[in-house]
Image: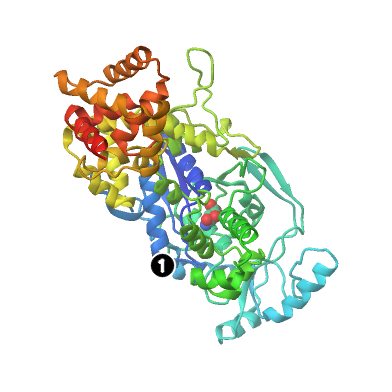
Amino acid sequence: MSLFVTRFAPSPTGHLHVGGARTALFCWAFAQRKKLDGNDGRFMIRIEDTDQARSSDESARGILDDLAWLGITWDDGPVLKNFGAAAATIGGDSRNVGPYFQAQRLDIYNAYIEHLVRLGRAYPAFETSAEQDADRKAAAAKKQTYKYPRPADVQLGVFNEARWARAVAGEAHVVRFVMPRAEIRVQDEILGEVKFASGEVDDFVIRKQDGFPTYHFAVVIDDELMGVTHVLRAQEHLINTPKHVALQGALTRLPPGLGARGHPGEAFRVPAFAHLPLIFNLDGTKMSKRDKAKTARKALKDLMAKDASLTPASLAQTLGVDGALLQGFIDADNDSLDIAQIVAAHFKIALPEIEVWDYRKSGYLSHAITNFLSLLGWSTGAKDAEGKDIEKFDNAFLAAHFALDRIGKTAAKFDRVKLLSFNADAIAALSDADFSRELFAWADEWEPDFARALRSTPDARRAVLFSACKARCKTLRDAIKVMEFALVSDEAMPFDPVAMQKAALLAGGAGRAPVESFGAMLRSSPAPLSAADVDAWIKQYADTNQRKMGEVAQPLRVALTGTVVSPPLGDVAAVLGREGSLRRIERCLAH
Ligand code: GLU
């Protein structure tokens, strides 16, 4: 039995992006598969909160909550208490390698920084940012990437005591790594061997001026001390990997106590790397939060084009946002997510879903999302009876079939239409009881008024309603519109005057007749009302009276729902029942 440890290491600077969720899902599936194979597979979460200005506890909590909601639970990592209906506790520190928030590990990083400096593999650097800006600009002018030139007094393997003394005395500095001048080869489980030429990477910063380690340094220390064996992450990180491999080559273990485990002097291991294919929009652009700004910007521009009285200044006032910020947003100088959200809320514009949170809010089922995400860059390799690739499966199936060698190299396309159809199918496939549970859970979280209306609907009507409407909801949010007709009381349902007029005028002003006849039928036959009976009645009435189906169905629809759009009439009448339907018909006729 071997130990396999994967980790998902989000930076808590916002919501969980669907790309991050895909990474987490694959890390989870890898560890689960190892468990199924009889090994000790562990999936761990580490919160990379070294960017103090951008990190927040709230974001970390939100990310953990989204992961748990997706069913991606972790063996080790921050503890999430009271999750879900079962009030579960997720996470913990069974291997004693925490804490899992990097901001709580500064003493560990500092010890290793000093260790590297004394080995002559790192050094304090004192240039001001203004000095470097000038060099950066000069490089840009020559169309070159700026590379920090190693100072003449720095030599690989030689402890620079003078620099260290200045740093210890309190002079502002960063610490840089002495990047070995040699080609670096990264063995990637998906991409094969990737070579980085000597000199491609400069002496990069490993500790910032604020005393926090950079991402590169903290990742390498933590992956080692936390026993990570497999690093699965997005391909955009491939460019960072030579830095990590170089650091791993330079570092050795300090005595236990600082992150425990291991033997002092032992060299850091290079974990197995698997860089996952990028995720693109269908149009080939990178899928990012910016897509929201783009959509809101386009909507604003369309509005201004239509209505000359709308100016950036007037809009800023209407929206209650800073004028300069809004102007910048319209000119695409900034992609403020706040502005995008304010614009969307005010003008009722749907922004593209990018984060797991967006999809939750829109009423997607977690297992439809994980099913869809699984197929972004991975395929099951399993065939159905007709020999087609199996595409619909749950997380357990993913875990049982997961293997790195079925991950592709090329970018995956994020097809929103496909995701929506996965979701619609997943909703339609729910049992009535599961649909009810999912819908209530969703409504309680996002639309409490809707949840209240559902609860105050009589049980019998609600049961028929759920079973009749399930297949018409592509998302749980769709249920608000689809079920609207049944959630108002029969006595209070409003009749849309335009719809009433249209319906009455049908068939040369004879729109009232089928409503009266339907009412008479309801009064005279005692059997419970089924959707099939109602459909048969409409057909028969239309045949007998030589009317088009619509000339019968539309007036009835208005009578039963107050509007011209609703689920099929048979379902509507069955949901309302004989009594309810009659009450509405009588009110309609009285109108
Ligand atoms: N904190 C990094 C991120 O959010 C993690 C990268 C890695 O997995 O090494 O992108």
Given residues 93 and 143, the one toward you in this image is 143
Label 1 environment density (alpha carbons within 10 Å; few <14, some 14–19, many ≥20):
few
Query: Ligand 1: does it lie within 8 Å of the C-beta at label 1?
Result: no
Residue located 50% across and 70% down the image: 318
**Residue 588 horizontal/vertical position (percent):** 26, 37
Label 1 belongs to which residue? 104
Residue extending farthest front: 508
Residue 21 appears in the picture as rendered: yes
Residue located 59% across and 82% down the image: 167
Based on the displayed image, in which of its 4 quarters is residue 168 positioned?
A: bottom right
User: Which quadrant does the C terminus fall into?
Assistant: top left
Based on the displayed image, in which of its 4 quarters is residue 480 positioned?
A: top left
Given residues 254 and 142, the one toward you in this image is 142
Number of numbered discs visible in the structure rendering: 1
* Relative to 115, residue 269 above or below: above
User: Which quadrant does the N terminus fall into?
Assistant: top left
Residue 267 appears in the picture as rendered: no
Given residues 95 and 17, the one toward you in this image is 17
Does residue 198 appear to the left or right of 583 in the view shown?
Answer: right
**Residue 243 horizontal/vertical position (percent):** 64, 57
Amino acid at dot 1 = Gln
Residue located 66% across and 67% down the image: 333
